[in-house]
Image (tube, rainbow, N blue to C red):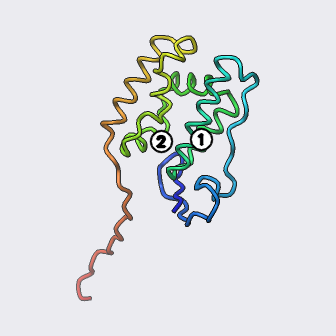
Amino acid sequence: MTLTYCGSCGWTLHLAPVQAGVPAGHALRGQEEVAAPADEQTLEGQFQLRCRDLISEIRSLGFDPNVWVAMINNLGAAGAARKLLADHHMLVVTPWLVRRGRPELTLEHEIGQPRWAELFTDDERADAARRLARAAKTPHRRRRWPRARRAPRRPGF
């Protein structure tokens, strides 16, 4: 089964069986692909390729991080990561991955890897580590249907 979540609220949007011979992430229509970096030889280009691999792995687990993909395609992977850190935003997929025991697939984990030390400042890497730790403590909010309210009873009815 493939499961598509809303990138902003985590609500289930689509549930479908996997098509035979098609990887799970490709069974969905309208999936935006991560753009190729301008130069694959630079460290920023390598980071974008790594983020593309992470997104592919995340999609194979049933989550489409479409907001992250759009940011990468507009700003580049390193630019998207810096913007998320500067704006104090965490991707919806981060707690989702942590709850499933896959923190190594998060952007925050990747930012902390020594390989990318030249791309991110010490403060950015420390902030990413704090966010990853916070994601582990984020409680899972179950969405519930609101209960119907009853009209107040009128005397005599």
Give the spatial CA distance, label 1 vs label 2.
Answer: 9 Å
The residue indicated by pointer 1 is 67
Query: Which label was assigned to residue 92?
Result: 2
Secondary structure, mark 2, is loop
As helix, strand or loop, the secondary structure at mark 1 comes to helix
Q: Give the residue drawn at x 70%, y 32%.
A: 74
Which numbered tag is attached to residue 140? none
Q: Earlier in the sequence, mark 1 or mark 2?
A: 1
Q: Are marks 1 and 2 in contact (CB under 8 Å)?
A: yes
Residue appearing at x 34%, y 31% in the figure: 134
Q: Is residue 47 left or right of residue 147?
A: right
Residue 82 position by quadrant: top right
Res 41 quadrant in image: top right
Depicted 56 relative to depicted 152: above or below: above
> Which residue is outermost to the right?
38
- Which quadrant: the C terminus? bottom left
Identify which amino acid the numbered label 2 is placed on. Answer: Val
Q: Residue type at mark 1: give it.
A: Val
